[in-house]
Amino acid sequence: MALWIAFAASAVFSPPEAAASCRLSHDGATAVTVKDSVTIYFSLDCTDILPYLKQNEGMMDGFMAALNEAWTSGRLKTVEIRAFSCLIGTEANCRKVADRRADNLASYIAGQSGIPKETISIAETDIAWDKLYDMVSRDSSMPGKDDVLKIIKETPVFIYDNDGKIIDGRKNRLMEVGEGEAFRYMRDGFFPEMRYAAALILTEEPVKATKEEPARQEPTVEQEPVIEEAPVIEEEPVVREEPVAAEEIIEPEIFDSKVLIKTNIPYWGLVVPNLAVEVKLADHWSLDIPVFYSPFTVADNYRFRTFTLQPGVRYWLKPQMKGHFFGVHVTGGMYNISVDKKYRYQDTDGVWGAGIDYGYALEFSKHWGMEFNIGVGYLWTKYQTYYNVENGAPCGISTHNYLGVTRLGISLIYKL
């Protein structure tokens, strides 16, 4: 599945326990120091770690080298991980996706570096509300900006009635701003940056004395022992910073396009050229229009001449027109068919019908994907039977009602 990943070897991750660069946290004779970090961005609902994409493997190698050096030198204290998700989907699903991203990053780092997984701690998984607030506040062209900022800051994630039932919430109010315009703007411009996981290396370094201790005087009979107080080293104030955004990269989500061109491969084996256009109507909804046209007579004992349309409306479980979908379709067309040397069948009133669909779509790259679908339904046709010879005479007319598979496809997809 499409996944875009950006890595940064600078301080892009700022947990509460550490400043953006480094800070001292005294514990005996050591201090915790923030050394290196890495940030990974994901496509929607994706949780896999694929660092070789987008030529970022070298950056991950640098992070791993720093981690291995800290581990072998005995300076590694922990690796902290935080992971976040956007607002597409239910609250529970968003948090579940963030959890998986954090756990997968922890497993990947442990597997690649060889350090014990218990050395890696997951500090936080959540929806990136703070990140969203910051991006909205910095965007001067954001529609409904003031209302959005107020909702994020003041509205609870969930609002309950007296019976404990959820009746409203922050996301629902955001979706109402400008009749959905603000939410669509954030979905297209901000949500990709909310889908990320970050890892931070914390190491322990010796604390250097800030000033030379005075020589201790030996007690005498005339002089009481002088008890020196230990020098007080004040902690530097912690300045929390937002993660530094990695260079913006456009997500290669093939099905984020609104127009797809497809062709059903098995029909080419029947010598029936075909082409389909699928248009995104709204989140989760699309219109699919396949056209089958064949004017060819391949041989006396085989022809599949047809002009058929099978438009349908689909509902996608994911809003990017990928994964599972369900739909309904209608069929209308004409045909002239022969499959042996004895008879030829030609419609008199066309073929008409309707049915329901199920399918699954996946992507290979930025522009290419594949779709598998099957539909069942009803077809009605009236046709004339001819003897399959040149200028063969008609020998019967029939009407046929069919109930069964009405669509079947393995289609290659190209994004415009």
Image (cartoon, rainbow, N blue to C red):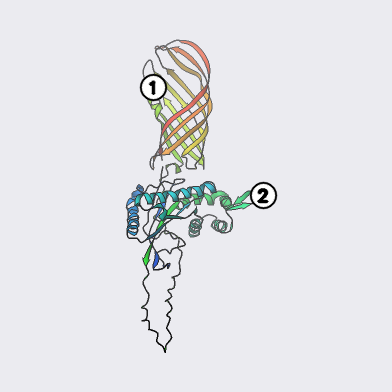
Residue position for label 1: 296
Q: Nearer the viewer, residue 248 or 142?
A: 248
Alpha-carbon neighbours of circle 1 within 10 Å: few (<14), some, or many (≥20)? some
Q: Quadrant of residue 297?
A: top left
Residue 117 appears at what percent x and percent y?
A: 40, 52
- Which amino acid, by three-letter code, is at mark 2? Asp
Kindly identify which numbered label has been placed on residue 163. Answer: 2
Q: Nearer the viewer, residue 42 or 293?
A: 42
Q: Determine whether 333 is above or below 164 in the image.
A: above
Query: Can residue 56 be seen here?
Result: no
Residue 68 appears at what percent x and percent y?
A: 33, 56
Q: Nearer the viewer, mark 1 or mark 2?
A: 2
- Which amino acid, by three-letter code, is at mark 1? Phe
Residue 319 appears at what percent x and percent y?
A: 50, 42
Q: Determine whether 251 is above or below 395 in the image.
A: below
Of the 4 image quadrants, the one containing the C terminus is top left
Of the two numbered discs 1 and 2 on the same chain, state the one appearing first in sequence: 2
Q: Determine whether 286 is above or below 34 in the image.
A: above
Q: Image point 49% across, 26% down: which residue?
A: 406
Q: Determine whether 223 is above or below 167 in the image.
A: below
| Residue 86 as seen in the image, left or right of residue 72 | right
Q: Which residue is outermost to the front?
A: 221
Q: Image point 44% across, 73% down: which residue?
A: 234
Q: Image point 47% across, 13% down: which residue?
A: 385
Q: Nearer the viewer, residue 184 or 88?
A: 88
Q: Nearer the viewer, residue 147 or 245?
A: 245
